[in-house]
Amino acid sequence: MRTLIVAPNWIGDAVMSQPLLALLRAQQAGAPIHALCPPHIAPVYRAMPEVDAVIESPNVHGKLDLAGRWRLARSLRAARYARAVVLPNSAKSALVPWLAGIPLRIGYRGEARRLMLNRMHEDRRQGAERPPMVDHYAALAFEPGRAPDGPVADPRLTIDPALAHAARERLALPAGAPLFALCPGAEFGPAKRWPARHFAGLADLLRAAWPEAEVVALGGPRDRPIGDEIAAQSRARVRNLCGDTTLAEAMALLSSAAGVASNDSGLMHVTAAFDRPMVALFGSSDPRHTPPRSRHARVEWLHLDCSPCFERECPLGHLDCLNRIEPARAMRALRAALAG
Ligand code: SF4
């Protein structure tokens, strides 16, 4: 049964969909799985062995662009998909599989999709009741209302080690030096970002413990100013690579990192999927819903009375949930992660 996955728009959500793909593959070994995704997510699906082809489309999300979606749907018809699994909740994301005439179209009820989906799942749980995102996606491999037998596996990505060598070479990072990566971005908003001064303090501790190490900040172009702040505030040398790497290169570097400190972000899920030692710093969000799924990850979450608030900016104006996680505490957690 040839399957089309309509991918989510966020890097972390894409990573958390991997166990679903593994379940689909296990149910029908040899049946091709293709991922339809925006270009900025494509490297994540290329790192999943279950995916046989990645189809990049700029209009999977965003504007309605009916003409573009119609053209895309027409081009997909030739592949004769037997089913589509639609991961985002928007009506727009369900449109293409419907227009492409894919006979079985699976997804959560979401917004106004009764016509476009014909195997509809429901999950009305809210707040702390919400299941882990990995389980939420994995349920789509089964009939509605049927839970997976046993625990769902953790997301795993694989990448050619040669890509990590090539990325280090291009960025003039010494091949033999341990690499510590700081991931200070979080697209959702500042209420998920550990302060730059704390990342800088952690960089100082890392360089004091491992003088031979390279410490880099990784992220997208929009994270560049935060990376600059960290580099300016740290007494140790921190190379700000935010915006200087492709996502594929950042993934390759994370796959070979000695240790990582990350906000709750897409790169946190990427690091966990490579099973690298990491401290994950949680502020306004909830690690019970989107934890880094790796035994080498340690979560720092203060779980204050006000958290999780799920706000983009701190409604109380103090951001205590992150300000009060001191660098020394993050360092202890990272050491524990390194010890396994
Ligand atoms: S209200 Fe509490 S949990 Fe929300 S951002 Fe502020 S300190 Fe953090």
Image: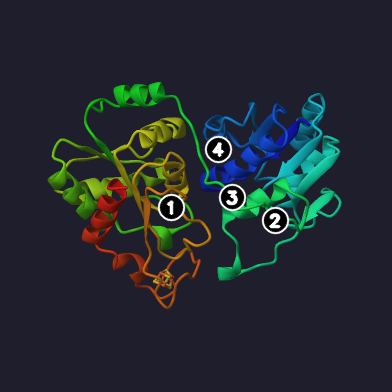
Q: Residue at x 73, y 33 (%)?
A: 28
Q: Which mark is residue 291?
A: none
Residue under numbered circle 4: 41
Kind of residue sitting beneath label 1: Ala
Residue 208 placement, left or right of 59: left
Ligand number 1: quarter of image: bottom left
The residue carrying mark 3 is 152
Please state which of the two labelled residues, at mark 2 or mark 4, is closer to the viewer. 2
Q: Quadrant of the N terminus?
A: top right
The tag earlier along the polypeptide, 3 or 4, is 4
Q: Residue at horizontal 74%, vertical 56%?
A: 146
Q: Of 288 and 75, which appears nearest the observer? A: 288
Point out the frontmost of discs 3 and 4. Answer: 3
Position of residue 29 measured from the top left corner of the image (x, y, whole percent): 69, 30
What percent of the width, then of the height, locates residue 131? 60, 61
Q: Which residue is mark 1?
A: 186
Is there a contact, CB below 8 Å, between mark 3 and mark 4? Answer: no
**Please, what secondary structure does the residue beneath circle 2 have?**
loop
How many other residues sit within 10 Å of disc 2, few (<14), some (14-19) or many (≥20)?
some
In front here: 136 or 192?
Answer: 136
Q: Secondary structure at mark 4?
A: helix
Q: Marks 3/4: CA distance?
A: 23 Å
Upstream in sequence: badge 3 or badge 1: 3
As drawn, 42 above or below 162: below
Q: Amino acid at mark 3?
A: Val
